Amino acid sequence: LSIVREEAYYYAPQGMTKIMNEGWATYWHSKLMTEKILDPSEIIDFAENASSVLRSSGGRLNPYKLGYELFRNIEERWDRGQFGKEWEECDDLAEKKNWNRRSGLGRAKIFEVRALYNDITFLDEFITPEFCIEQKLFSFAWSSRNDRFEIESREFRQVKQKLLFGLINGGQPYIYVLNANYDNRGELYLKHEHQGMDLRIDYAREVLKALHRVWKRPVNLETVLENKPAVMRFDGKEHSESKGKAA
């Protein structure tokens, strides 16, 4: 366990800036290749390879694309002066759309961001409603009716909240042991500290199965599913879910 702990601490800083690291690398790779290195005959091949890195599929967040697009967005906004009190207090949508103070501060700003921010502060500070719309970001949740993840909301605050919650604790849920002899039967009883994001049911079931192999007794997990308390259970043969907390 001490080896696992030391390894986790070693990689923790990289985990805290994963989106920024991938986005920064992609940003400069694109800049150098398209502006300095490639000749015109190589552009199509480069674009094809780059698109495979930046594409999103299956409802999964692509850190390369999110980081890359947000760095580009920050650079453009600071180049055009789309920040500060005057910008924030402007209510004219047409004026904001064409806003360009020719500030030219974009490059300096992204270097500042790279030096001072981590993924959580990066997204919290710079993601805007306009960025979410442009990038077609949405939040999704598990549907017990259809037994799959489905789009839950496109509302900015909810999308941003889900993004941030997904980064807390390195994106891993907080789960604690409440009872190692639950109901006096040697069962393991765990509790998930729900922070706005439901567990992925398919992942949770596999974890319960793996824990059962180690514990050799049924494993219970108290959580929240679709805004309702629930207990997931694996007894060694089958999975079950019950509403409400265990007695």
Image: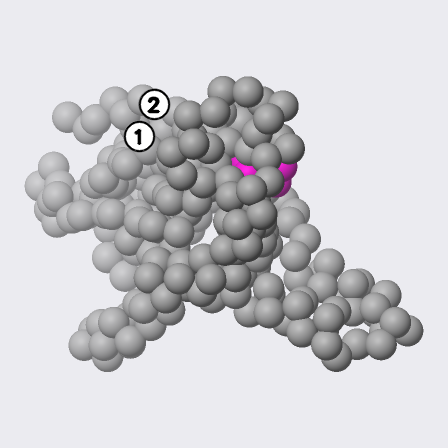
Depth check, front residue: 207 or 99: 99
Which residue is located at x 28 percent, y 70 percent? 8
Magenta span of residues:
131-136
Q: Residue 207, which numbered label?
A: none
Q: Identify the residue position indicated by label 2 in the image.
A: 227
Q: Are marks 1 and 2 in contact (CB under 8 Å)?
A: yes
Residue count near mark 1 (Cα–Cα under 10 Å), binned few <14, some 14–19, many ≥20 = many
Which residue is located at x 66 percent, y 68 percent? 31
Please indicate, yes or no, whether residue 217 appears anywhere in the rendered image. Answer: yes
Is 145 situated left or right of 135 in this image? left
Q: Residue 233: image x %, image y %?
A: 31, 39
Depth check, front residue: 120 or 179: 120
Is 193 situated left or right of 150 in this image? left
Q: Residue 224, which numbered label?
A: 1
* Figure quadrant of the C terminus: top left
Q: Residue furthest right?
A: 41
Q: Amino acid at mark 1?
A: Val
* Residue 135 included in the magenta stretch of the image: yes
Which residue is located at x 37 percent, y 66 percent? 115
Instruction: Judge whether 88 appears above or below 121 on screen.
Output: above
Q: Residue 34: image x %, image y %?
A: 74, 69
Q: Secondary structure at mark 1?
A: strand
Q: Residue 68: image x %, image y %?
A: 57, 57
Depth check, front residue: 5 or 75: 75
Is 184 situated left or right of 164 in this image? left
Please indicate, yes or no, whether residue 60 appears anywhere in the rendered image. Answer: no
Q: Amino acid at mark 2?
A: Asn
Magenta: main secondary structure equals helix
For the image, the number of numbered tags is: 2
Q: CA distance from mark 1 to mark 2?
A: 6 Å
